[in-house]
Image: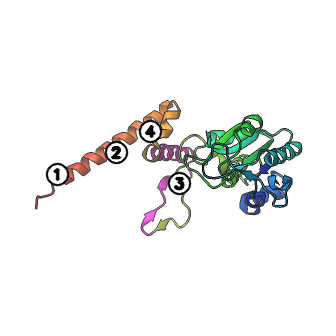
Amino acid sequence: MKYGVVSLFPEWVEQVGQFGVLQRALERGKISIEGFNPRDHAMDNHRTVDDRPFGGGPGMLMQIDTTQAALAQAKTALPQAPVVYLSPQGRKLDQRLVGELARLPELILLAGRYEGIDERLVAEQVDFEVSLGDYVLSGGELGAMVLIDAVSRLIPGVLGDQASAEQDSFSNLWLDCPHYTRPVDYHGETVPEVLRSGHHGRIEQWRLRQGIERSWDRRPDLFERRTLSQTELSIVNEHLSTLEKASTTRDGKDDEKPDH
């Protein structure tokens, strides 16, 4: 995967490849990250890259000409890459979109600053917009770094064991299951026996159940996105029954408390 980042601070985004998994991926040539700075194309002594918006209001907008020039430079270097604009108006970044992007050979990430980018340039040059969520950042650089990290994990050879990516949260649309390591006993809490059994079938069933139960408790919105299999539906029903019994037991104990 080749990433091109159009940003006023490309060196900042490039730092995502200086540590850990992505550093090793860069060293092995599994990914590359190249920055393209609109300021390099400014024609005045102050290297101006912003201007006032029509209609008034606070803030500034990135200039069309300098941003366009940086985009053109990026497209020359990465001719197969779609342009992805990091924007609050875009499609929310989730694991499904990450998987779609990971199948591409190249990506150009456009990181805005100030109040954003002239809409005419977005309409002409941007293939699609991506958002990290319903909040606003000072610029698109952090979004670009998050996207690079998430997408790169799915590139074959980036992780030491590709199964790590396949078992991540949201890879099957469920949250990840709990994980444990040594010691077996920590402050009286022990590792679940099934994980020490060596029985791979039981372990996989336990992990699936834990992921679904966690998703129900913490992210019920995930259930809106899919039709449950018979196994998944059975797990949900059993979990609901357990929650109902626990609630009934708790309410019964509360009823037994004496009045003061």
> Which residue position holds label 3?
195
For disc 2, the marked residue is: 243
Residue situated furthest right in the rendering: 76
**Which is in the foreground here, disc 1 or disc 3?**
1
Give the amino acid type for the residue marked by disc 1 in the picture.
Asp
In x, y percent, where is residue 110? 74, 47
Q: Is residue 70 left or right of residue 56?
A: right
Dot 2 or dot 4, earlier in sequence: 4
Crowd band around label 2 with a 10 angstrom C-alpha radius: few (<14), some (14–19), many (20+) = few
Task: For the residues labelled 3 and 2, say whether their Cβ atoms are less than 8 Å apart.
Answer: no
Front of the two marks 3 and 4: 4
Amino acid residing under circle 2: Leu
At 43% across and 38% down in the image, what residue appears?
A: 236
* Secondary structure type for disc 1: helix
Q: Earlier in the sequence, mark 1 or mark 2?
A: 2
- Residue 227, position as x, y percentages in the image: 51, 30
When asked about the image quadrant of residue 125, the answer is top right
Q: Dots 1 and 3: beta carbons under 8 Å?
A: no
Q: Cβ–Cβ below 8 Å for labels 2 and 4?
A: no
Q: CA distance from mark 1 to mark 3?
A: 38 Å
Q: Residue at x 63, y 43 (%)?
A: 55
What's the magenta region?
A: 187-215
Judging depth in this view, the residue of 142 and 179 nearest the camera is: 142
Q: Alpha-carbon distance for marks 1 and 4?
A: 30 Å
Q: Amino acid at mark 4?
A: Ile
Find residue 235 and name its label.
4
Q: Secondary structure at mark 2?
A: helix
Q: Within the magenta stretch, is there residue 212?
A: yes
Residue, disc 1: 255
Packing grade of label 1 (10 A; few <14, some 14-19, many >=20) is: few
